[in-house]
Image (tube, rainbow, N blue to C red):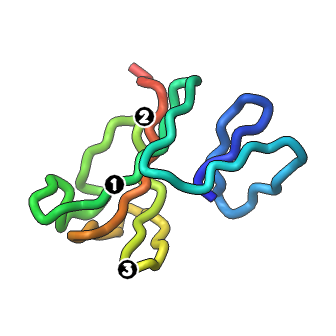
Amino acid sequence: MRKVIRDEKPLVPNGSLVLKPNDIIVWSGEEYFDPNGQDLIEFTVTEHHAWNHKYIRDLNLPDNKLIISINRNDEIIPATGNTLIQTEDRVLLFQGKNTK
């Protein structure tokens, strides 16, 4: 599960989210556009991608972007600052409205 829409508000599951009736669940997809200005984007890191062989903590992402997880060889890895991004990783990125 990648995202839940509840009462028109997006929620990113963090392990303690309890589903309720009428929740809308976004399971996966190459890209999900939310008309409220928040997107989930999943992409594959290529050999020449700027993030290849870098730790998430070193990416200097803006406040409105958050790497949620890495899919590596069909294993879902929760993203932390100590996660090293590698070639062929599938990155799930949450992109919110610009905060500045």
Q: CA distance from mark 1 to mark 2?
A: 18 Å
N-terminal of the pair, mark 3 or mark 1, is 1
The answer to whether 81 is drawn above or below residue 26 in the figure is: below
Which type of secondary structure does the marked residue at label 1 adopt?
Answer: strand
Q: At label 2, which amino acid type do we have?
A: Asn
Question: What kind of residue is marked 1?
Answer: Phe
Task: Please tell me which of labels 2 and 3 falls first in the chain.
Answer: 2
**Identity of the residue drawn at 42% across and 50% down:** 30
Q: Residue at x 40, y 35 (%)?
A: 63
Crowd band around label 2 with a 10 angstrom C-alpha radius: few (<14), some (14–19), many (20+): few
In the rendered image, residue 33, in percent from the top left (x then y), is placed at 50, 34
The residue to which callout 3 is attached is: 73
* Residue 67 horizontal/vertical position (percent): 41, 53
Q: Quadrant of residue 89?
A: bottom left
- Dot 1 or dot 2: first in sequence order is 1
> Could you tell me which residue is drawn at 24 percent across and 61 percent down?
45
Crowding at dot 1, Cα within 10 Å, few <14 / some 14-19 / many 20+, comes out as: some
**Mark number for residue 55?**
none
Residue indicated by mark 2:
64
Who's the residue at 13% across and 65% down the image? Answer: 47
What is the number of the mark on residue 43? 1
Residue 3, image x, y percentages: 62, 48
Disc 3 crowd rating (10 Å Cα; few below 14, some 14-19, many 20+) is few
Instruction: State how far apart marks 2 and 3 are (Cα).
Output: 28 Å
Residue at the top extreme of this rendering? 100
